[in-house]
């Protein structure tokens, strides 16, 4: 603001007097004029006032107009000053390209990384489900005595809820089924859902084509109708818009297509391929205790989820009188479908990542703040001169904050590039198991987040240095600038470094715990050899394979044909491969004495064909493996694993002992059959690498079959090269049989740990980034201290200090700072890594090995970062240093 | 006077003031005197209404003001045209002249023109 404008401004403050003077001049001139025309002075005054009009009103109007004008001018000046500050700031940043580049890059990484992670979190956790009034759509389950939620509800309970609830606008149930689509190219195995008509109203989204089926489909024996998913419609029917009304064949039965669901309908990537009506038969409706339906409800407007849960619990209470169900409390849990879809573990891992990236952002801000503090020192002279010339403290802080703002804006713009690249990379490696992750994008929410983060970080890294620089005492600064030898130990900068090291340590400890946990997990013996092993599904449809004999013969033929394929070393069937998801368990009890309630052991059960153990290279510890002689007519036999053998028979030899399976259930489960134990096999990780081995029972396929089996093939050549010949082999038995999802056993293992590995990898990347940033910070501070103490070092060297002593002095300085940071960080990590509880395997979150080694890594990094400046200190020329 | 005609009057008063100032800086009383003489007292405008118009135009940056001393050694506030004011005057007077020309042409017609 120039001096002239400033004075004009002062005058305007006094606007009332000015207006009065202007008007007085006018009236006086008018009076003079009238007198000149020959009026008496008093008459002239009256005439002049008449000519003028209402004096009071006019001067009021003038005053308010003046005020308005002043306001406009003020605002304009403020903006002009802002623009001036911005230009000045930009010039300052251009003048120091090195500083600006480092600061911009640091911020771009921090803002970019956090935006990329945020877009994942938003996509999975925060983005609403696509359904109409999605916040009213609830997942309904029964509360278990253990406190957990049983998400599978028996048919009769669901029917009672459907008929008697008062709080739900709609309620629907689904369960899943697999069918083979034929008549459209290669036979296609599809996983779909059975859904009651209420499901379409509970999770409502208008159909893409046609109309969803209505309540007439909820009765058994009603017509065969089907709703196709968008993906099925596209891939199997080429998006044919005339599909509605057509007949298609699944498992050999005709179904009329009534609708195509919209693309957005399935929140998960591997959602149902189709929906057919779920019509419970009277027999289904009496299967109490058999948990099989997933229940979705839509709250009536104004009803809370708690009210709905209470309403359903009321119905449960009445039901339980006649049909008590052990293990349940009788309570009902109503959870937003979104939360139920995402799952607690995924939710936690994403939030941990968001917190971790927040820490990296903090470290980045710490580094930029450090850079600014260092620069403030070299700008001390400039700032002091500007203050002496009348720039107020407020104006100086504003000036410095604007520079920070420019940096943050630039960082955000570059950061969007980093975010785009990072998100691309993340999505390419993202585990398919996390629902809705694949849809993440840099959308409006992510942009808004980036802007917010940029503003916040500008405040974080800019405010302290600005206040610090502007608040310095004027005289000491000007005096000190002349001959600067008292930079010395800057507590603020050291505090920032301590903070950065502590944060980096927390990050790395978290990452380290997950790495150690993954190492522990993979070091556990799986109980089989996974190398060059292929798995694929084969399912025999009910319509073609009507009898038990047909099914068993079908699997036999497929296996025989597969074994003739060149390159196949061995092959076998198992109902579910180890590690992979899914499972069923039942109570097993020794058959020697009558079963009494509570004496059974809960065991996982599967069926295997002959050759299973040799194909998997799984050891048989005692007795024999199931073989081809265990056919439909042979006496019933089983194999059990070592832990079940111990549990049932203690140390006694289990071979030849009798057991009963699925005791305490209805007749459908053949509990009356006694089976002879013929072999004991080693424990395997049946339900996942991170799950301890469970008790297991294996049946021969011929004696306890399932319609869908998994083929396991050990290759003598790379096993993925066999897929097409295996497909041909299966088709040679039955051209309508598909070979479902061929995948190597290694991939099965990889997929089972994909989510935690993803979290681990990201946390590791973030931890290493944090470490690098902190190292740069230490390097910067130590270099700065050396530069500040050049004279002191010079004197020390001149007085006979050895280079080694000087080096140690500098190193000690950097190292003590680092050690304080490590100490604080270890403490913070103990608290921070509590978030990982339940996510680590085989260690606790206070694993001493991780804590000690990460602390050592950080201390070592600090030492390395201090070495370069320390060496520089020893090369100081004493003469030059003293002269400068 | 009904409200809708005030706007028109105000606009034309602004234009007259700007025209007056186009010959050089002048104080409020001087502007009023000029207007009176130029229009032969035909404009029955209270002199006081000139000042709100001046202030308004100053807020719009069409004119600027400063205090000067008159020939009679008195302090008076002088107004002058800014470049923005000059542009506004040129544009507005053009519009006025075209409008007035049209009005004169139409109102001056003696015979009904042939239908198109």
Image (cartoon, coloured by chain):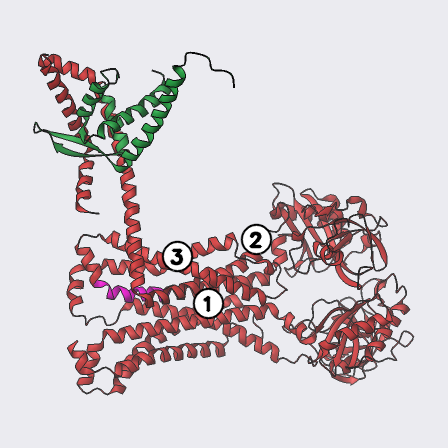
Chain colours: A red, B green
Q: Quadrant of residue A609?
A: bottom right
In magenta, the rendered stretch is: A366-380
Q: Is residue A652 visible?
A: yes
Mark 2: secondary structure: loop
Query: Count the marks: how many?
Result: 3
Answer yes or no: do the residues labelled 2 and 3 have beta carbons within 8 Å? no
Q: Is residue A313 visible?
A: no
Q: Which residue is mark 1?
A: A831
Identity of the residue drawn at 72% across and 74% down = A695
Question: Does A611 sit left or right of A758 as displayed?
Answer: right
In depth, the one of A375 and A304 nearer the eye is A375
- The secondary structure that most of the magenta stretch takes on is helix
Residue A876: x and y, percent? 23, 81
Q: Earlier in the sequence, mark 2 or mark 1?
A: 2
Q: Is residue B12 magenta?
A: no
Depth-wise, is mark 2 or mark 1 nearer the camera? 2
Residue A535, how many percent across, how many down?
A: 74, 73
Q: Is residue A407 left or right of residue A598?
A: left
Please state which of residues B1 and B18 is positioned toward the viewer in this rendering: B18
Asked whether A379 falls inside the magenta stretch, the response is: yes
Q: Nearer the viewer, mark 2 or mark 3?
A: 3
Q: Residue shown at 55%/62% (left/top)?
A: A348
Q: Earlier in the sequence, mark 2 or mark 3?
A: 2
* Residue tagged 2: A127
The residue indicated by pointer 3 is A409
- Secondary structure at badge 3 equals helix
Q: CA distance from mark 1 to mark 3?
A: 34 Å
Q: Nearer the viewer, residue A879 or A763?
A: A879
**What crowding class fits label 3: few (fewer than 14 Cα within 10 Å), some (14-19), or many (20 or more)?**
many
How far from the left and from the top, in percent, is residue A166? 69, 42
Q: Return the chain for callout 3.
A: A
């Amino acid at each position: 603001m120039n001096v002239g404008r400033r004075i004009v401004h002062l005058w305007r403050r006094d606007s009332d007097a000015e207006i009065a003077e202007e008007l007085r001049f006018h009236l006086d001139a008018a009076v003079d004029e009238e007198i000149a025309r020959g009026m008496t002075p008093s008459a002239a005054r009256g005439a002049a006032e008449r000519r003028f009009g209402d004096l009071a009103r006019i001067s009021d109007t003038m005053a308010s107009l003046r005020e308005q004008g002043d306001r406009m001018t003020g605002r304009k000046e403020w903006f002009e000053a802002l623009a001036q500050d911005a230009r000045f700031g930009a010039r300052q940043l251009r003048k120091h390209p090195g500083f600006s580049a480092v600061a911009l890059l640091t911020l771009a990484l921090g803002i970019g990384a956090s935006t990329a992670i945020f877009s994942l979190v938003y996509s999975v956790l925060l983005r609403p489900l696509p359904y109409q009034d999605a916040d009213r759509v609830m997942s309904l389950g029964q509360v278990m005595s253990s406190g957990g939620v049983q998400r599978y509800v028996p048919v009769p309970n669901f029917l009672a809820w459907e008929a008697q609830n008062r709080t739900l606008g709609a309620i629907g149930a689904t369960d899943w089924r697999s069918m083979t689509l034929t008549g459209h190219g290669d036979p296609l195995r599809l996983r779909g859902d059975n859904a009651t008509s209420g499901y379409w109203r509970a999770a409502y989204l208008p159909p893409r084509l046609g109309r969803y089926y209505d309540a007439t489909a909820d009765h058994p024996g009603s017509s065969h109708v089907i709703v196709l998913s968008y993906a099925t419609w596209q891939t199997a029917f080429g998006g044919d818009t005339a599909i509605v009304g057509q007949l298609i064949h699944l498992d050999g039965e005709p179904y009329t297509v009534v609708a195509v669901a919209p693309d957005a309908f399935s929140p998960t990537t591997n959602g149902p391929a189709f929906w057919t009506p779920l019509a419970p038969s009277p027999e289904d409706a009496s299967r109490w205790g058999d948990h099989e339906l997933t229940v979705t409800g839509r709250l009536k407007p104004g009803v809370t989820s708690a009210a709905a849960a209470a309403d359903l619990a009321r119905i449960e209470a009445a039901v339980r009188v006649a049909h008590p169900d052990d293990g349940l409390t009788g309570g009902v849990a109503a959870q937003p479908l979104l939360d139920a879809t995402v799952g607690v573990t995924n939710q936690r891992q994403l939030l941990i990542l968001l917190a971790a990236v927040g820490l990296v952002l903090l470290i980045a801000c710490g580094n930029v703040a450090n850079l600014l503090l260092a620069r403030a020192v070299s700008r001390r002279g400039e700032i002091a001169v500007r203050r002496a010339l009348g720039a107020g403290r407020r104006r100086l802080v504003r000036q410095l904050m604007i520079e920070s703002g420019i940096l943050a804006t630039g960082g955000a713009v570059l950061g969007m590039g980093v975010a785009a690249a990072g998100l691309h990379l993340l999505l390419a490696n993202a585990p398919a198991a996390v629902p809705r992750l694949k849809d993440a994008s840099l959308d409006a929410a992510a942009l808004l987040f980036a802007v917010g983060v940029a503003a916040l970080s500008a405040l974080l890294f800019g405010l302290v240095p600005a206040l610090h620089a502007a608040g310095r005492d004027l005289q000491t600064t000007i005096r000190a600038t002349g001959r600067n030898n008292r930079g010395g130990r800057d507590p603020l900068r050291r505090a920032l470094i301590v903070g950065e090291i502590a944060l980096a340590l927390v990050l790395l400890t978290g990452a380290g715990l997950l790495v150690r946990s993954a190492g522990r997990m993979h070091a556990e013996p799986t109980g089989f050899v996974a190398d060059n092993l292929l798995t694929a599904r084969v399912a025999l449809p009910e319509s073609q394979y009507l009898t038990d004999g047909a099914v068993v013969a079908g699997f036999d033929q497929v296996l025989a044909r597969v074994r003739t394929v060149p390159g196949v070393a061995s092959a076998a069937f198992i109902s579910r491969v180890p590690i992979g998801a899914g499972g069923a368990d039942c109570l097993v009890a020794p058959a020697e004495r009558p079963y009494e309630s509570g004496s059974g052991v809960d065991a996982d059960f599967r069926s295997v064909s002959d050759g299973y153990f040799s194909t998997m290279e799984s050891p048989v510890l005692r007795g024999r493996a199931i073989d081809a002689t265990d056919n439909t007519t042979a006496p019933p036999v089983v194999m059990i694993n070592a832990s079940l053998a111990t549990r049932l028979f203690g140390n006694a030899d289990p071979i030849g002992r009798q057991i009963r399976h699925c005791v305490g259930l209805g007749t459908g489960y053949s509990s009356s059959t006694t089976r002879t134990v013929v072999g004991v096999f080693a424990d395997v990780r049946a339900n996942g690498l991170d799950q301890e081995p469970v008790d297991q029972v294996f049946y021969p396929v011929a004696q306890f079959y399932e319609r869908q089996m998994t083929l396991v093939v050990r290759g003598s050549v790379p096993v993925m090269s066999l897929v097409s010949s295996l497909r041909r082999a299966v088709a040679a038995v039955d051209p309508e049989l598909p070979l479902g999802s061929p995948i190597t056993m290694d991939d099965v293992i990889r997929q089972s740990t994909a989510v935690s590995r993803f979290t681990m990898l990201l946390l590791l990347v973030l931890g290493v980034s944090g470490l690098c940033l902190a190292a740069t910070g230490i390097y910067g501070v130590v270099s700065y201290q050396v530069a500040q103490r050049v004279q002191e070092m010079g004197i020390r060297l001149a007085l006979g200090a050895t280079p080694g002593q000087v080096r140690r002095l500098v190193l000690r300085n950097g190292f003590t700072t680092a050690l304080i940071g490590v100490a604080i960080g270890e403490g913070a990590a103990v608290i921070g890594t509590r978030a990982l509880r339940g996510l680590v395997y085989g260690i606790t979150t206070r694993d001493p090995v991780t804590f000690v080694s990460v602390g050592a890594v950080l201390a070592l990094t600090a030492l390395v970062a201090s070495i370069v400046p320390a060496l520089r200190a020893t090369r100081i020329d004493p003469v030059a240093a003293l002269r400068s | 006077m009904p409200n809708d005609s005030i706007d028109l009057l105000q606009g034309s008063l602004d234009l007259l003031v700007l025209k007056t100032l186009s010959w050089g800086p002048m104080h409020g009383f001087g502007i009023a005197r000029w207007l009176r003489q130029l229009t032969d007292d035909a404009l029955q405008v209270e002199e006081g209404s000139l000042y709100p118009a001046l202030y308004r135009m100053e807020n719009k940056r069409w004119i600027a003001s400063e205090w000067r001393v008159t020939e009679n050694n008195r302090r008076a506030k002088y107004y002058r045209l800014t470049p923005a004011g000059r542009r506004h005057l040129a544009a507005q007077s053009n519009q006025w002249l075209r409008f007035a020309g049209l009005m004169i042409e139409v109102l001056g017609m003696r015979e009904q023109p042939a239908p198109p």
